């Protein structure tokens, strides 16, 4: 069965802290994605990766960075957390280049920055 | 650029009735795919149904069907015989041939009334 896991379901951090959100998939997918979800805005793409050590900016990369050292793991890093980064973060993976690019999602991490 | 529009922030339906959730899209690609995902209050994204731009027949998956009108650029989700468990947020998403990532709409919150 397809599996995408995220390190935490709920996380509370203080302003200025460095925050790591981890995502692991067991499907040997090349493509991995990080989204944030806010009410009324849907899912917005932060960063994505097509392969190990490769990354591409999405629509809202400011304040975030990513790391992909192994194929199965894609980390989202908040260098200095701010209150406007309080959100739901969703990780996803998909098989290589072909439609339909169906994405498999993790359970999400609800991050609160105080 | 790809764009997805969901104009219904919230919808109500009586149990056992059918409901249509609207989705319009914009893309300049000839090859693309449209997805619908369900997100219950627990947060996970559940894939429901997929329609390819070259598929001649509308996609169906159990109680879900996708009313695909290519000329109007619409891909509405129809849920027949609504159940209380259908109460959730529903997202429409577009994958186009020139981009590997999905573009999501803002979502529709569906509430099924007993």
Image (spheres, rainbow, N blue to C red):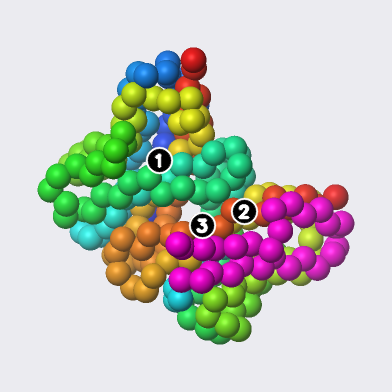
- Mark 3 and mark 1 on one chain: no
Q: CA distance from mark 3 to mark 1?
A: 21 Å
Is B84 placed left or right of B79 in the picture?
right
**Circles 2 and 1: CB distance less than 8 Å?**
no
Viewer-side label of 3, 1: 3
Disc 2/disc 1 C-alpha distance (Å) = 23 Å
Q: Chain of mark 3?
A: A
Asked if residue B70 is positioned above or below residue A97 in the image, the reply reads: above
Residue B53 location in percent, x, y? 21, 53
Horizontal relation, residue A7 to residue A41: left or right: right
Report the magenta residues as a range.
A1-27
Where is residue B104 drawn, in percent x and y?
45, 49
Q: Which residue is mark 1?
A: B5
- Residue at position x 83%, y 57% in the image: A13
Q: Are marks 2 and 1 on the same chain?
A: no
Number of numbered markers: 3
Can marks 3 and 2 be said to lie on one chain? yes
Q: Is residue B9 visible?
A: no
Where is mark 3, residue-wise? Answer: A105
């Amino acid at each position: 069965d397809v599996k995408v896991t995220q390190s935490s379901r709920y996380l509370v951090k203080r302003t200025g802290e460095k925050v790591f959100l981890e995502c692991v998939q067991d499907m040997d997918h090349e493509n991995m994605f990080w989204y944030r979800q806010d009410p009324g805005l849907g899912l917005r793409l932060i960063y994505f990766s097509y392969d190990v050590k490769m990354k591409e900016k999405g629509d809202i990369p400011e304040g975030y960075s990513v790391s992909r050292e192994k194929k199965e793991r894609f980390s989202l890093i908040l260098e200095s957390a701010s209150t406007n980064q309080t959100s739901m973060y969703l990780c996803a993976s998909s098989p290589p280049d072909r439609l339909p690019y169906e994405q498999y999602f993790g359970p999400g991490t609800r991050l609160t920055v105080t | 650029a790809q764009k997805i529009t969901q104009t219904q922030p919230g919808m109500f339906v009586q149990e056992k009735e059918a409901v249509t959730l609207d989705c319009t899209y914009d893309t300049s690609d000839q090859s693309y795919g449209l997805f619908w995902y369900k997100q219950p209050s627990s947060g996970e994204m559940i894939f429901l149904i997929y329609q390819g731009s070259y598929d001649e027949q509308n996609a169906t998956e159990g109680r879900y069907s996708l009313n695909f009108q290519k000329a109007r650029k619409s891909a509405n989700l129809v849920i027949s015989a609504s159940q209380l468990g259908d109460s959730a947020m529903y997202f429409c998403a577009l994958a186009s041939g020139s981009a590997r990532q999905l573009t999501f709409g803002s979502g529709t919150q569906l509430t099924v009334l007993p």
